[in-house]
Amino acid sequence: MAEKPRLKIPKDAKKGELIEIKTLMPHIMETGQRKDKDGKTIPRKIINTFTCEFNGKSVFSANLDSAVAANPYMQFFAKVEESGTFKFSWTDDDGTVTTAEEKITVG
Amino acid sequence: MRQLSRRATLVLGAAGATLTVFGWGGRAQAGPKEAADQIAKFTGGKTAAQGKISIELPEIAENGNTVPLQVTVDLPMTADDYVSDVMVVSEGNPNPGVVTFHFSPMSGKAEAATRIRLAATQNIVVVAKTSKGEYFTGQKLVKVTIGGCGG
């Protein structure tokens, strides 16, 4: 998957502020339920894990099942106490891990 | 018109019933039982208390392929007492699992949103676990006009 994830995070925040983070990963999220035109089941291929870390510490993560819609969207919060870097990762069923980073200035 | 004998009628009726069972029951659906099993695995058999959870879903989802879902757990998020895991389970999809969110004290707020697929009109059940090992649950019925699991 060479697709680039989309991130929406404020560039700066006040110390202790609760910020909202939105992410979207372009992905088909093939359920493993569908059949192709020859009647063969199309194997499951989904993003099964999403993680968000801030300065190396886990903030939020999710285990996704095939019931998550295509182009998995995640919206959640983080409380920031210091400047640093958010690191995101998306793990595909085939083992591919896509990562993205975003810096935030806290003052 | 030739009258059907009583026996022939019975045979036809039985054939019809068999067709109904095998013809329409072709796709396995997870029911409330599968959902309950999934929840029992998550809670380790403990009973979850009703409340503290709000689920935002459209009352009627016209397209089951992408249905916005937001879950909020109304509990504190401090370093030693926070909502650690929130599991979302479907009672009417082919698989009961939907998504499990894992929070940390750095989350600040036990709220997350995503978009999900719904195969049919059903209950969505949410179970939250706190760092102290307490469980809370809530559910919401969502009507689905067009199912979203392909096929």
Image (cartoon, coloured by chain):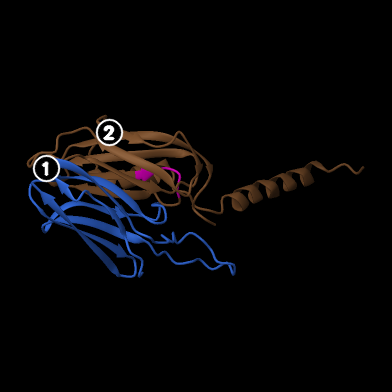
Relative depth, front residue between B118 and B94 = B118
Give the structural element (helix, strand or loop) at label 1: loop
Q: Which residue is at a point 26% across and 29% down the rendered structure image?
A: B51
Residue B76: quarter of image: top left
**Neighbour tally class for label 1: few under 14, some 14-19, many 20 plus, Cα within 10 Å:** some
Element at label 2: strand
Magenta-highlighted residues: B89-93
Compared across the picture, whether B52 is left or right of B76 comes to right
Residue to which mark 1 is pinned = A14
Label 2 sits on residue: B53
In percent of width and height, residue B80 lies at 7, 41
Q: What shade does chain A have?
A: blue
Pick the front one: A48 or B63: B63
How far across and how far down the image is residue B47, in percent? 24, 36
- For image coordinates 44% across by 59% down, the residue present is A31
Residue farthest toward the top in the current orientation of the protein: B51
| Number of numbered labels in the structure image | 2
Amino acid type, residue under disc 1 in the picture: Lys
Farthest residue in the right direction? B1
Q: Main secondary structure of the magenta part?
A: loop
In percent of width and height, residue B72 lies at 27, 36
One can see residue B104 in this view: no
Which color was chain B given? brown
What is the chain letter for disc 1? A
Disc 1 and disc 2 in contact, CB within 8 angstroms: no
Tag 2: amino acid: Ile
Residue A69 painted magenta: no
Q: Which circle, 1 or 2, is nearer the viewer?
A: 1
* Identity of the residue drawn at 69% across and 50% down: B15
Q: Is residue B148 above or below residue A89?
A: above
